[in-house]
Amino acid sequence: MEVIYHKKQLQDYIERQKEMGKKIGFAPTMGALHQGHISLYQKAREENDLVIASIFVNPTQFNNAEDLKKYPRNIEKDISILEKSKWVDMVYIPQVEDIYPENTISKHYDFGGIELAMEGASRPGHFDGVGTVVEELFRQVQPDNAYFGEKDFQQLAIIKKLTQLLNLPIKIHGVPIFREKNGLAMSSRNERLSVESREKASIIHTALVQAKDWFSEFSIEEISEKVAALIASQKNMKLEYFVVADETSLQTTTTKNTSQKYRAFIVVIVDGVRLIDTMEM
Ligand code: PAF
């Protein structure tokens, strides 16, 4: 596996691969890699000639300086995980100036409303930051296919919209959530949890499974109250939000219509760590 640290080196590499007619599969990450990331590369391996990873902790998508500071970083370990997986041909680890040559600021995008609820409401500017870094990485890596986890379902929708807005010839693929044995969605942030916190955080998945069970019988308002009560019953856990949204428009709703598909979105702070999860209802 090759490791590339600079944009110029990457440009030469991509030019060579394109000349050979290679089909490129790409999944960008912010590191602290886990099995969920590896499942993206496994999928990319099945569908492409060349698989590229990237690791870049993108400052513009953090609306909280403390969160950025605490984001887990371990490049050596990440490189070794990718190498051992055998799915990846090259990992790009750009420097800040390779992505932001002038100022480290976001562009502004109009995603047509899908950016407004949930993470967009809770983390102002977050999706502009994600859009900016993903646009830049897409322009540099020029993949044919790109892979993103469904855990960040709203992000996945934003990236599909971004490629459409920019008219980029890239197919975006969602990859199912990879869960720990106890149901907890795999996330880089789980690294910040103690063994006990990881165990009790499985209640987030339990809450979603329960919500799905309750969905045909109870109103969305009643389900939200039940989920809030379940999370409130746990020590050192705070529910940031639990909402149900239309799966396509990503507008939150309190009413149900049998012809529409719905998805629940939840964010819980467990011992100070912000964890996100989602499930179709
Ligand atoms: O999901 C992530 O890890 C990040 O938001 C992404 C897509 C790599 C952009 O920084």
Image (spheres, rainbow, N blue to C red):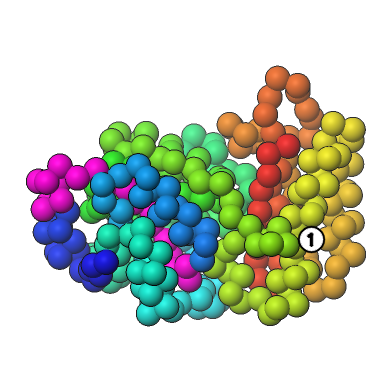
Residue 150 vs residue 42: left or right? right
Coordinates of residue 271 in the picture (x, y in percent): 73, 75
Dot 1 alpha-carbon crowd within 10 angstroms: few under 14, some 14 to 19, many 20 or more:
some
Q: Is residue 162 above or below residue 86?
A: above
Inspect the magenta stretch and tell me whether residue 64 lies in it.
no
Q: Is residue 24 above or below residue 79?
A: above
Coordinates of residue 149 in the picture (x, y in percent): 51, 50
The C terminus: image quadrant: top right
Q: Is residue 154 visible?
A: yes
Q: Secondary structure at mark 1?
A: helix
Numbered marks: total: 1
Name the residue type under label 1: Ile
Residue numbers of the magenta segment: 15-33
Nearer to us in this view, 23 or 230: 23
Inspect the magenta stretch and tell me whether residue 17 lies in it.
yes
Nearer to us in this view, 195 or 68: 195
Residue 142 vs residue 180: left or right? left
Nearer to us in this view, 11 or 158: 11
Q: Is residue 246 above or below residue 86?
A: above
* Location of mark 1 (residue): 203
- The image quarter in which residue 110 lies: top left
The N terminus: image quadrant: bottom left
Q: Is residue 107 visible?
A: no
- The image quarter in which residue 97 lies: bottom left
Residue 197 vs residue 75: left or right? right
**Residue found 24% across the figure and 43% down from its top:** 23
